[in-house]
Amino acid sequence: MSAAGHALALRGLTKRYGDFTAVDDVSLEVAQGEFLTLLGPSGSGKTTILMAVAGFVAPSAGSILLDGREITPLPPEKRNFGMVFQGYALFPHMTVAENVAFPLRVRGLSRADRDTKVRAALDLVQLGTFADRLPKQLSGGQQQRVALARALVFDPNLLLLDEPLSALDKKLRAELQEELKALHRRVGRTFINVTHDQEEALSLSDRIAILNHGKLIQSGAPGTLYEAPRTRFVADFLGKSNFLEGTVQGADADGFVLAAGPDRLRVRLPAGSAVPAEGSRRLLSLRPEKISLLSDGEAADNTVDGRILAWSYLGAGFALRVATPSLGEIRAVLPAWQAAIAPAEGLPVRLGWSADAAVPVEDDAP
């Protein structure tokens, strides 16, 4: 199996259904050998984009290019893309080997060539000893690996994945995520994945493209999107976040102070960032896990007193909802191991965070 990936480009891709715009002028580059995830809520346009790339949906406007070559008018069978669906789509009356061999039979390969490629594809997904079984004799995870082998066996230009792990339980989904990531490294193919699962997107992807209402909101490496979201939607959709709003006071080269009611919150900006104008309104995103529980006398760049409204045990940590006098409700996640307190409703606490923990984000247009 060749390890050469291919580059894909979307230029102004748009899809309308009557008055409804499912995909709205999306331009996106997918690098050779990259694992890109299209992430967004239901109705965001991610699956429509994937179907347009596959050739099953004709765009209303825009173009799709593979290695710089226009492929928008090509039918699906001329694109040589592998596809893995959420429901596996295996033939129940065929064995594992026959399922994997099916796209090779369609392409007219000889029996000897088919057998060689099927063995290699099943070994790739660690199912070489399952060739003679029927799909009903396999677990959900094994069936999904068969679907992956079938999508890769004919050496596709791209591998397209439409929520391939969503039918699996949480534990099996986590195991398959690791296997899929390792498989991507081994084959060197360009993968485009669609999901609404934020953890899956963060775990699998080289890069994530976040969509909402048919528009591309932000794309970037998982760590960049999580640590530096551009908008409130991105911060709130990719993980959880607190949002603090106030007026800029005392801006300097390193950052600014945000006045939020009687509180003064110090914000340190990355080098080279534009400092907001004095008196302007700003919105901050503060991740719950970046908040600490302070003991008496302990200092932090920003501190706020409050009382625990509610709490839950997450295994590795405690999730707290804390009512504060001027910042409203703040959510914090604290390690459970050797925790400084035993959480209880009504318990007074003091929260703190560093000046670079909160990042400015744009409020989303209505």
Image: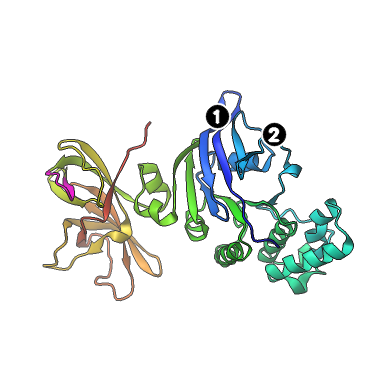
Q: Are marks 2 and 1 in contact (CB under 8 Å)?
A: no
Q: How is the image coloured?
A: rainbow
Q: Where residue 243 sits in the image (x, y, percent)?
A: 29, 46
User: Split into 4 quadrants, where in the image is the N terminus?
Assistant: bottom right
Q: Where residue 352 sits in the image (x, y, percent)?
A: 20, 60
Mark 2 residue element: loop
Relative to 233, 334 lies left or right: left
Q: Is 252 part of what is drawn in magenta?
A: yes
Rendered residue at 59%/65% (across/down): 176
Magenta region, residue range: 250-257
Q: Where residue 118 sits in the image (x, y, percent)?
A: 78, 65
Q: Is residue 41 above or below residue 333?
A: above
Which one is in front in this view, the residue at disc 2 or the one at disc 1? 2
Q: Which residue is mark 2?
A: 73
Q: Residue furthest bottom?
A: 338
From the image, give the main secondary structure of the stretch colored magenta.
loop
Q: Amino acid at mark 2?
A: Pro
Foreground residue, 55 or 131? 55
Q: Is residue 82 above or below residue 178?
A: above
Q: CA distance from mark 2 to mark 1?
A: 20 Å
Query: In this orientation, does residue 223 appear?
Result: yes
Query: In this orientation, does residue 95 appear?
Result: no
Rendered residue at 31%/57% (across/down): 288
Relative to 115, 250 lies left or right: left
Q: Where residue 286 sits in the image (x, y, percent)?
A: 29, 52
Q: Residue furthest right?
A: 111
Q: Amino acid at mark 1?
A: Thr
Q: Residues within 10 Å of mark 2 (few under 14, many from 20)?
A: few
User: Split into 4 quadrants, where in the image is the C terminus?
Assistant: top left
For residue 21, which numbered disc appears in the image?
Answer: 1
Q: Along the polypeptide, which appears first: circle 2 or circle 1? A: 1
